[in-house]
Structure formats: structure tokens, C-alpha cells
Image (spheres, rainbow, N blue to C red):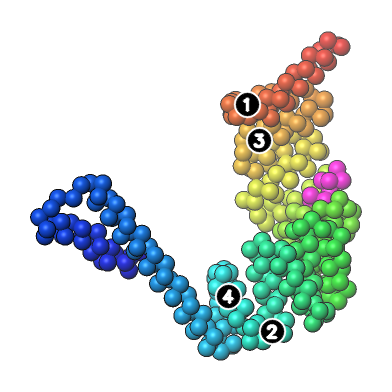
Amino acid sequence: MKPRRLPLLLLLLALPLLLAQCAGKQQSPDSMRRELMKRESALAAADEDWEKKQARAARAGQDKIPADRLEVLGEMALQSKDYETALMNFVEVLKKSPNRHDIHYKVGVIFFLTGQMDAATKQFAQVLMQRPEMVEAHEALGMVHLEEKRYALAIEEFRIVLNQDPRRVKSLHLLGIAYLEAGQNQQAITELTKALALEPNNLNSLTTLGQAYLNKHDYAKALGPLKKAQTLAPQDLKVHRHLGMALAGLKRYPEALDAFLKAGDEAQAYNNIGVYYFQAGQYEEAAKCFQKAIDLRTVFYQEAKANLQRALEKLNLSQRDS
């Protein structure tokens, strides 16, 4: 119940008691409950009607606000991440000026940020019908395609941007991600290397480049960007996890375990390093790591239990063969 209705609510709740006392009659508990429920229902209906009137008044008031003021209010709301208010104001601007491509772009951004990808696509497409050269709209549309796993379309949009501005780091990075997600690791490496030539300390590009090398099992080359990323962001869990994978791939197991431990989950760290021991045929070491993972998370760690069983089976086979 809203605070502004509290005095009225107290009065309504007290009214049955006052009437009963004045009449000299005693109401039954059931009768009192029914009366209270009826009055609460009436109060809720009145409250809902009041809110509807307030909303109508607000909409009517907005019609009288100049477009430039609505745009400022929308910008302020967008900056504070109040997307609902921002959208409401920008839509009012578009009612007054339907061809404002810059406002359509901002509406598209709000739809993207709130996960409404179809609506975002329509807004960016409308912008590009008016301004086909607008790199921000191509880039944003590419991000929608990337989010929706339409990698070929995403690559096409980022390429359009880079044809106009080859040094646009954000599009180079996004193009690298699109290639990576599409399984085209070498193309991803090419674009991410270009991005890092322009912005050497870009943490996201360094991490993604390391991931692309990991996908190619080129662990030595993955190590460089991931080590630099670790220096730039020593608390980044994803960097530590990828660095652990690179070190384990190089069979530098103690260093890999340390990196996995810094990724935040001790049981997962021992399970991870156990997998690499297992892949290298070091079944005894693998079994020890899987057992350690189980000890750390006895009841819930099914993955480590399954891995331990496989390692013990392999260890028994190798011992019989020897």
C-alpha cells in the first residue's frame, strides 16, 4: 500500500469498529474480516484509478514539452541507465520529428541494451536507410548480429565500417570476436593484431587474441598477450583461466595450477589441471588432482568424480601392460 493512502486506509479500517460501538452491537470476526477485505478492495481500485489519472496527466504534460527539452531529458535518463524513461522521451521526440535519424539510433541502442534485438534491428535499419554512411549504426547493427549469432552478417557490417575508417579500434576488435565465434581463428588473430597495433593495452583485445591462439593450440603465442593482460588486470578471472590453459598446454603444470587457482574456484582449478595431466598420459598425477577436487567439493563435484574414474581405469591398464 502506498504511503500517501495510509491515513485514508486507517480511517477505513477503523470505521467498522466505530459504527459497531456506536450502535452498541458486537460484530463477529468473520463479518469484520469480510468488511475489511471489501474496504481494502475499494481502496486498491481507487488507488489504481488515481495512478491512471496521473499517467494520463503526465502524457498530456509531455505533449506540451518542447522537443529539445524532451531530448535533454532522454539523454539524462540514458546516462543514468533509466532506459524506460529515456525511451519514453525519445519516442515523444520522434512523434514531433519522425525523421530524426539520431534519435532512431538512440532508441535502437536502448533496445539493444535491454535485449530487444528485433526492435533494435528495425531502428538501426531505419537509420541506415536515411544515413547509409553512418558508421555507428553499421557497428551497432553488427553488434546485434553478433549477439544473435549471425556471424556472417556481423562480419559484413564491421567490414563496412572499416572500409570507411580502417583505424576504428572498436570495429577491429568486434570483427575479431565475430571471426573467433565463427571458428575462423586466423582471421580473428589478424584483426585483433591490427587493433592492438593501434591500442596496445586494450585488455579485451589481448584476452581475445590469447583465446584465438588457444583455439589453434598455439600455446606459446597465446602466452604473450595473456601475460600482458594479466599485468594490466591482475584480478580478472577470465585472464587467469585462459593463462592457465596456455601454461598447461605448454606442460608448465605448477604455473598453470597457480593461474587456475587465481581464477577463483579451487576445486575447478584442480579438476582443470587434472584434465591436462590426463591428456598427457600422466594418469597418476591426474588422479591425484581429481581426488583433490573431490575432497574440496565432496558432494557436488560430479565432473571430478567421473574424471577420477577414467584416470584410475587408465592407470590400472597402464600398470597391467607394464
Quarter location, residue 119: bottom right
Query: Which numbered tag is attached to residue 294?
Result: 1
As measured in the structure, the alpha-carbon distance from the residue carrying label 4 to the one carrying label 2 is: 14 Å
Residue found 76% across the figure and 78% down from its top:
127
Q: Is residue 14 left or right of residue 288?
A: left
Within 10 Å of disc 4 (Cα), the crowding (few <14, some 14-19, many 20+) is some
Q: Which span is picked out in magenta?
A: 210-218
The amino acid marked with disc number 4 is Met
Q: Secondary structure at mark 4?
A: helix
Task: List the residue tagged with mark 3.
Answer: 268
Q: Which numbered disc flags the more N-terminal residue, 3 or 2?
A: 2
Contact between labelled residues 4 and 3, with CB atoms less than 8 Å apart: no
As measured in the structure, the alpha-carbon distance from the residue carrying label 1 to the one carrying label 3 is: 10 Å
Task: List the residue tagged with mark 4.
Answer: 88
226 or 26: nearer the eye? 26
The amino acid marked with disc number 1 is Ile
Task: List the residue tagged with mark 2.
Answer: 98
The amino acid marked with disc number 2 is Pro
- Mark 3 or 2, which is nearer the eye? 2
As measured in the structure, the alpha-carbon distance from the residue carrying label 3 to the one carrying label 2 is: 54 Å
Q: Is residue 236 left or right of residue 3?
A: right
Q: Which numbered disc flags the more N-terminal residue, 4 or 2?
A: 4
Residue found 71% across the figure and 63% down from its top:
117
79 or 223: nearer the eye? 79
Total labels drawn: 4
- Mark 4 or 1, which is nearer the eye? 4
Q: Residue 73's x, y, as percent? A: 55, 80
Q: Secondary structure at mark 2?
A: loop
As measured in the structure, the alpha-carbon distance from the residue carrying label 3 to the one carrying label 4 is: 46 Å
Q: Residue 310's x, y, as percent? A: 76, 22
Q: Residue 139's x, y, as percent? A: 78, 70
